[in-house]
């Protein structure tokens, strides 16, 4: 029957089930079991009762077993039963066990003969049993009876498949001897999930009810309709014996005498009957468990490892200890300061590879968003020239001026300087909002203590707003300083003489400071306005340089599709389409020429608003400005054409001077703004969190209330600690047993092609309409049989593979029963 060390493995699995049941569904392991499968009235219940030697299963017509019954048999000195949902209560009367099974079944399924996949766990201790773990499943039925649902066949098939499709489940296929074995539903389902027969054991019942002159000798000898693991014949009590309360022990003795006296079976009597079936199942299940234990241990260790850190942190907090509360408050405040600084400085332990956050976003504001806002101010060339024209003419008044008035230059420069206030204030606002967003990321870790989280958020947000106000005052002062004195003696200022000789376009190129072949940006963009006949929207690899925009088939940059010169190009925003969430902008020619082939504009799409803004900033660097519609508030309309060549030269001179001076201002502001914001806002907030926050929290005088846990956190802490303890207990249980034992060799493969695939009949109608055929289970290629001829561990060594894909409904969650 196998050595004692191997038999001890089955109680080990039962203890594992108990330990893991306290750890919740997330710790569920597919523990090795034997599933009993068969049609209605095939004798499944009688086989199980013979194992126990007692009457304890409900009986009747139709579907009696309506929930899976996980039956654990354990050898013990006394005889009693225990239910997992009635933990601690011992049932010594087996009639009471039967009533409890019926009551628990009706509690979930009701009395309408419906079924449920939620199992009932029953453990029976007895000196008359071998250590086995079996699952009794509802009998396979074809036709709904009474008020059973029309798709009852599919429901039962789904439930059975949930158990037998697992590769560590042995299948006990029960078939009556007085039916056609070739049409056995149990064997068909078993073959669907176990085509090589490595974990299927055939059981033939009702041998004593066969017609006179017939027997099942050829089947039991595995010569006719062979199975790899063969068949074991049993003789159960008849309905008359059950009604007459015939003792199970007497029935087992009668079974033994039947095989010994029957001429067709007496030569194999030692390998027939319920006792031999028990021993065989015990040996096979023990082998199966032994091979599965290494995987169990590895799984438990990985789960414990993932919980260790959190469990240790949760153990350190004691809600009733004031000293622990104060220490935790100090630790949380210190951790907040460290986390905030890491997000700002970019030295976080966990680097976000999906989105920009914290310091990276602020850096983008400094060097992309803010310069983009500045360039938008100077992008309207037509309006600037109009303002210079009006300024010169207004300064001259009724007189005709011979010289270029420097007052016009100063007036235009001061107006340009004043326009910087908007972008600068907007930059401060964006940085302030990003600091608050970063704060929210950090204080989310305080969600276990709602009051502490709320007060911390209030105190730090107030500080950020105060520093924001100070920073705005300083930024406006910087602009006022520039307005106070126009320094025309600056070493980088070109002066009047040079301005009169400088061509505006050349000056722009100098200001851009870029070589013609300088690459500004590379990236993927989608050309979204190409017609379907021309390939439709397609993604290309774009390269933006100082003079052109080129795109290639891919980022290898080998196959160039087109090169678009940037001369006379501008861009504008395009509204998102109803069918797409991409951000789109369009390039167009100011002289109304085609931009690309016969297209007046080129619409380019990117994945996010951030990417769109980044491309716009890059286009501005290349001298491509956004479209802007100008409306003169005074109703002057478009500027007049220059009829006076002298006035035209004066406008051009002032334009060059303004451009030169403002380039100095832009360079200065771009340099000073990040420094000012960094000093007055970011560094001040970091310093406040690290040194002042804890003092202000203490000043509230509610330290005890601050450290009150939320209800959700209390439950989470208890759950994590309970799960951690259960997993450690389960791992300790496994560690006590040695698995260095031998196994029983698996018989060689046989030809089981005689078993036809299962094809359940379609029900006529259900409440939800007509339901299609239950999908069949994918079969294993036939050549797989030649690769598995050694033993059962060839299955169990593959425990890490996913079970066969069996279509089924998900079972409801198992309710917690007090």
Image (cartoon, grey):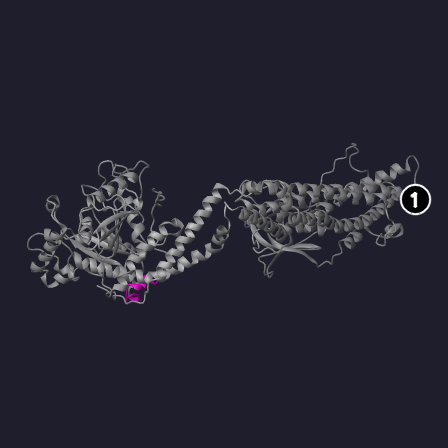
Residue closest to the eye, 346 or 575? 346
Residue 685: tell me if it is visible.
yes
Give percent across and percent down for residue 695.
64, 45
Q: Count of labels shown?
A: 1
Q: Which residues are magenta?
A: 786-798
Task: In the rendered view, tell whether residue 416 sits above or below residue 563.
Answer: above
Q: Residues within 10 Å of mark 1 (few under 14, many from 20)?
A: few
* Viewport quadrant of the C terminus: top left
Q: Quadrant of residue 262?
A: bottom left
Task: In the rendered view, tell whether residue 21 sits above or below residue 145.
Answer: below
Residue closest to the eye, 194 or 112? 112
Task: In the rendered view, tell whether residue 95 sits above or below residue 728.
Answer: above
Residue at image point 22% right, 41% down: 99
Was residue 134 drawn as part of the magenta stretch in this picture?
A: no
Give percent across and percent down for residue 484.
85, 43
Give percent across and percent down for residue 625.
71, 47
Task: In the rendered view, tell whether residue 696 sits above or below residue 292.
Answer: above
Q: Quadrant of residue 260?
A: bottom left
* Viewport quadrant of the N terminus: bottom left
In this rendering, position of residue 408 left or right of residue 421: right
Was residue 790 drawn as part of the magenta stretch in this picture?
A: yes
Residue closest to the eye, 144 or 310? 310
Q: Secondary structure at mark 1?
A: loop
Give percent across and percent down for residue 575.
61, 41
Residue 527: tell me if it is visible.
no
| Circle 1 residue | 403
Residue closest to the eye, 266 or 161? 266
């Amino acid at each position: 029957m196998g050595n004692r060390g191997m038999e001890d493995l089955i109680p080990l699995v039962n203890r594992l089930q108990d330990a893991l049941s306290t750890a919740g569904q997330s710790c569920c392991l597919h523990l090795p079991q034997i599933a009993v499968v068969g049609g209605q009235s095939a004798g499944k219940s009688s086989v199980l009762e013979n194992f126990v030697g007692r009457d304890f299963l409900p009986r009747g017509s139709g579907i009696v077993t309506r929930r899976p019954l996980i039956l654990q048999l354990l050898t013990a000195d006394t005889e009693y039963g225990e239910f997992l949902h009635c933990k601690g209560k011992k049932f010594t009367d087996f009639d009471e066990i039967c009533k409890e099974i019926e009551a628990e079944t009706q509690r979930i399924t009701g009395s309408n003969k419906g079924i449920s996949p939620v199992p009932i766990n029953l453990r029976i201790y007895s000196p008359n049993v071998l250590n086995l773990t079996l699952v009794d499943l509802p009998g396979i039925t074809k036709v709904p009876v009474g008020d059973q649902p029309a798709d009852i066949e599919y429901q039962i098939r789904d439930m059975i498949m949930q158990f037998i499709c697992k590769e560590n489940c042995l299948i006990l296929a029960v078939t009556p001897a007085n039916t056609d074995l070739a049409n056995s539903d149990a064997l068909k389902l078993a073959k669907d999930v176990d085509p090589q027969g490595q974990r299927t054991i055939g059981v033939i019942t009702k041998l004593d009810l066969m017609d006179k002159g017939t027997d099942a000798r050829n089947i039991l000898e595995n010569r006719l309709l062979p199975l790899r693991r063969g068949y074991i014949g049993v003789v159960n009590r008849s309905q008359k014996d059950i009604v007459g309360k015939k003792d199970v022990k007497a029935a087992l003795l009668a079974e033994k005498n039947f095989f010994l006296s029957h001429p067709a079976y007496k030569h194999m009597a030692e390998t027939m009957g319920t006792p031999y079936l028990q021993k065989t199942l015990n040996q096979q299940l023990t082998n199966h468990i032994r091979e599965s234990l290494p995987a169990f241990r590895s799984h438990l260790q990985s789960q414990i490892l993932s919980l260790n850190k959190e469990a240790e942190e949760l153990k350190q907090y004691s809600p009733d200890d004031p000293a622990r509360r104060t220490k935790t408050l100090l630790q949380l405040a210190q951790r907040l300061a460290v986390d905030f600084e890491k997000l700002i400085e970019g030295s976080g332990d966990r680097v976000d590879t999906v989105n920009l956050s914290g310091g990276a976003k602020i850096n983008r504001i400094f060097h992309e968003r803010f310069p983009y806002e500045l360039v938008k101010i100077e992008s309207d060339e037509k309006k600037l020239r109009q303002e210079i024209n009006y300024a010169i003419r207004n300064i001259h008044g009724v007189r005709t001026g011979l010289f270029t008035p420097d007052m016009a230059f100063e007036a235009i420069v001061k107006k340009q300087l004043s326009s910087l206030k908007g972008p600068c204030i907007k930059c401060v606002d964006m940085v302030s909002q990003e600091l608050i967003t970063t704060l929210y990321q950090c204080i989310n870790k305080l969600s276990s203590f709602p009051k502490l989280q709320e007060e911390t958020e209030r105190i730090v947000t107030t500080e950020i707003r105060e520093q924001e106000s100070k920073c705005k005052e300083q930024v406006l002062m910087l602009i006022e300083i520039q307005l106070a004195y126009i320094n025309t003696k600056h070493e980088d200022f070109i002066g009047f003489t040079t301005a009169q000789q400088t061509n505006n376009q050349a000056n722009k190129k100098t200001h851009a400071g870029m070589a013609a072949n300088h690459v500004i940006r590379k990236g993927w963009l989608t050309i979204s306005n190409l017609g379907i006949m021309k390939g439709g929207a397609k993604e290309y690899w774009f390269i933006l340089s100082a003079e052109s925009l080129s795109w290639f088939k891919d980022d290898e940059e080998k196959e160039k599709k087109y090169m678009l010169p940037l001369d006379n190009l501008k861009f504008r925003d395009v509204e998102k389409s109803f069918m797409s969430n991409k951000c789109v902008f369009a390039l167009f020619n100011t002289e109304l020429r085609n931009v690309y082939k016969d297209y007046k504009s080129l619409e380019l799409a990117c994945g996010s608003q951030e990417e769109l803004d980044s491309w716009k900033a890059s286009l501005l660097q290349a001298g491509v400005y956004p479209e802007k519609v100008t409306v003169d508030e005074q109703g002057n309309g478009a500027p007049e054409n220059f009829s006076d060549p002298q006035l035209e030269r004066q406008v051009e001179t002032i334009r060059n001077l303004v451009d030169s001076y403002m380039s100095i201002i832009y360079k200065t502001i771009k340099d000073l703004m990040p420094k000012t914001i960094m000093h007055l806002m970011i560094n001040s907030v970091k310093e406040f969190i690290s040194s002042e926050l804890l003092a202000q929290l203490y000043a509230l005088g509610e330290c005890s209330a601050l450290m009150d846990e939320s209800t959700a956190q209390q439950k989470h802490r208890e759950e994590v600690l309970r799960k951690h303890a259960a997993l450690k207990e389960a791992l300790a249980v496994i560690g006590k047993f040695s698995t260095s034992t031998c196994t029983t060799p698996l018989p060689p493969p046989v030809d089981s092609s005689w078993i036809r695939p299962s094809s359940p009949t379609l029900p006529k109608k259900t409440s939800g309409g007509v339901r299609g055929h239950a999908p069949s289970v994918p079969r294993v290629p036939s050549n797989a049989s030649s690769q598995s001829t050694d033993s059962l561990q060839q299955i169990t060594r593959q425990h890490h593979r996913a079970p066969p894909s069996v279509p089924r409904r998900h079972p409801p969650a198992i309710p917690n029963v007090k």
